[in-house]
Image (cartoon, rainbow, N blue to C red):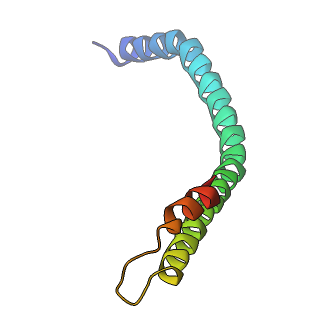
Amino acid sequence: MTQQSTLKVVFMAVNKLSKPLEDMRRQVKTWKKSMDAFSRGAVPMAAGLGAGVGMAAKAFADLEDAGVRLKSSLMGASGAVASEFEQINELAIS
């Protein structure tokens, strides 16, 4: 193959691939814009979700702590818990 015919084949290939490659470039650019917009919203969303989970975990921990304190307050010298504990604990949970 001569240099001129090789060059002609290369130009034809570039010419045929130009449109599909340009379309791909535009699509990737559109995807990038979408991902940028999503990532800007993801950080506040994750912070809000984390705060909600953290608040729920703290409330649960506070409830458990209160239950343990109540149980130890109602515990007698023998280590037995007063019978009223279950009723008071259920009332506190509800």
Q: Quadrant of residue 76?
A: bottom left
Which part of the image, by quadrant, shows the N terminus? Answer: top left
Q: Position of residue 9 (x, y in %)?
A: 41, 11
- Residue furthest toward the bottom? 77
Nearest the eye: 35 or 52: 52
Q: Position of residue 73 (x, y in %)?
A: 53, 83
In this picture, is 15 found above or below 88? above
As drawn, is 36 to the left or to the right of 89?
right
As drawn, is 53 to the left or to the right of 41?
left
Residue at the image point whose x is 51% and y is 9% from the top: 16
Residue at the image point whose x is 66% and y is 54% from the top: 52
As drawn, is 32 to the left or to the right of 67?
right
Residue at the image point whose x is 69% and y is 35% from the top: 33
In this picture, is 82 found above or below 37? below
In this picture, is 27 found above or below 29? above
Nearest the eye: 34 or 74: 74
- Residue furthest toward the left? 1
Q: Position of residue 72 (x, y in %)?
A: 48, 81
Q: Position of residue 63 (x, y in %)?
A: 58, 66
Total label count? Answer: 0
Nearest the eye: 11 or 54: 54
Residue at the image point whose x is 50% and y is 62% from the top: 86
